[in-house]
Image: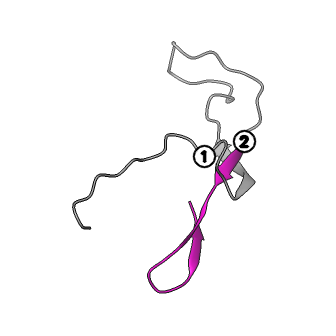
Amino acid sequence: MNGADINPKTTLKDDNDEIVSVGSTYFNNKAAHDQEIFTNTDHNSVLMRNVPIKTVKLAKGSCNCV
C-alpha cells in the first residue's frame, strides 16, 4: 500500500472476465420453522444465480477469481 486513493467498483456487471453460475442455500423452503415473518415457498434448497467475476493475478503468480 502506498497511501494512494482507491476507486472501488460497486459492480462488475459491465466490466467482467466471465459470468459464472453460483449456488446459494435457500433456507425458507422447509415445512416448518419458528420465524413468523417469513412465508415458506416451494423453491429448491439451492438457488442458482449468474454472477460476474474478474480474474486477478496473485503475488506468487497464480490467478484467482473474485
Q: Main secondary structure of the magenta part?
A: strand
When the figure is inspected, residue 34 is found, relative to residue 62, above or below; the finding is above
Residue 46 x, y percent position in the rendering = 71, 43
In which quadrant of the rendered view does residue 63 lie? bottom right
| Residue 50, quarter of the rendered image | top right
Q: How is the image coloured?
A: one colour
Q: Is residue 15 above or below residue 41?
A: below
Q: Quadrant of the N terminus?
A: bottom left
Q: Which mark is residue 66?
A: none
Q: Which residues are magenta?
A: 46-66
Is 16 located above or below residue 58 in the figure?
Answer: above
Q: Residue at x 76, y 29 (%)?
A: 43
Residue where numbered disc 2 is placed = 49
Pointer 1 residue: 12
Q: Amino acid at mark 2?
A: Arg
Q: Is residue 58 above or below residue 66?
A: below
Q: Nearer the viewer, residue 66 or 46?
A: 66
Query: Is 59 left, or right, of 57 in this rendering?
Result: left
> Which numbered mark, 2 or 1, is in the foreground of this view?
1
